[in-house]
Amino acid sequence: MPLEIHQQGIFNGHKAAVYSLVGSALNPDIFWSADGNGNIVQWDFAQGNMGKLIARLPEQIFSLSLYEQEQFLLAGGMNGGMYKIDLLQKQLAHDIITLPGTIYHSTEIGNKIGLCCKNGTFYVFDKNTLQKEFQIKVSDKALRRSVWLASENMLAFACSDSQIYLLNWHNNSLVQKLAQGHNDSVFDVCFLPHEQVILSGGKDAYLSIWKKNMDHSYELSHRIPAHHFTINRIVSLAPLPYFATASRDKSIKLWQNETYQLEKVLNSEKNASMHRYSVNTLWWIPSKRILLSAGDDGNIIAWNVLFH
């Protein structure tokens, strides 16, 4: 079945690189972005290119997560600051918590929040009180991203030591270390639950596919030279049978879930209003079939994904 991609619009209010996007599951018209000037902006598709600044934080923001039921955003910064932003009051709702190094990502795990930090430690907080409960030393290098594999009660970590770590959440023990997939820092991991596959990408520009074995371990299945430069982000386009990668080479690529065949390339050669510099992050809105992308040029682009 053919796949079509059309640019729907551009949100261009940021004056610095955009590093993180997050959207609402309850209202798919709403999403938020965070940039290198510490600005957190709320956008509404109904309002077009009229973003609303809801917070200005004192450092570059690399991580932004939404806790919709509790009505707050959690932002993580380059200098280790963690900021809770009340979405009802549109203001900081908690004292700043400082961790020893850049916060690259946060993951919701039940009533816990886990933060990936530059020092290779995963810091776990109570979601309601933001009190730190414990920490897990995963590596001596930075943890760039984590993904919660709920069906397996397991966490997967993308790490700057070129490896991926799988941890049992029940007892925080190392289940498996995935090596040989990358020869430099791993920037992202993505889980395709239906296919029982882990995807990873990073600084070496390779896309690695790890398939689950009968004994529940994961084995390297494919290693694809996917981009010219760093793969910054990988997202599943479920329920569509595709996933997307974003890269420092200024492109976005869409791939088939089962065959890993490259299906579409979005770059400046094919679209004059494409990102001019690195594409840093992606966010998928399944109910609208819209893929959001953002990058170093400060632009956020909405792409309609049509699958016939």
Image (cartoon, rainbow, N blue to C red):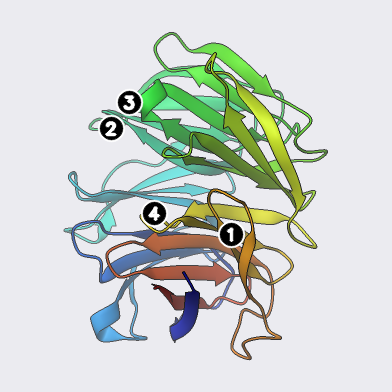
Q: CA distance from mark 2 to mark 1?
A: 35 Å
Who comes first in sequence, dot 3 or dot 4?
Answer: 3
In this rendering, which labeled residue sits more in front, label 3 or label 4?
A: 4
**Badge 1: residue crowd in 10 Å (few <14, some 14–19, many ≥20):** many
Q: Which residue is mark 1?
A: 255
Instruction: Indicate the secondary structure of the residue bearing disc 2.
Output: loop
Q: Residue furthest front?
A: 1
The answer to whether any part of residue 306 appears in the image is yes
Q: Give the number of marks.
A: 4
Marks 2,1: beta carbons within 8 A:
no
Please tell me whether mark 2 or mark 3 is closer to you in this view. Answer: 2
- Look at mark 3 in the image and give the residue it sits on: 131
Reading the chain from its start, which is encountered first: label 2 or label 4?
2
Q: Position of residue 109 (x, y in %)?
A: 34, 30
**Amino acid identity at mark 1:** Trp
Give x and y (percent) for residue 294: 53, 69
Q: How far apart are the alpha carbons under marks 2 and 4?
A: 27 Å
- Per the image, label 1 sits on a secondary structure element best described as strand
- Rendered location of residue 269, percent (x, y): 71, 86
N-terminal-most mark, 3 or 1: 3
Q: Amino acid at mark 3?
A: Gln
Residue at image point 35% right, 69% down: 289
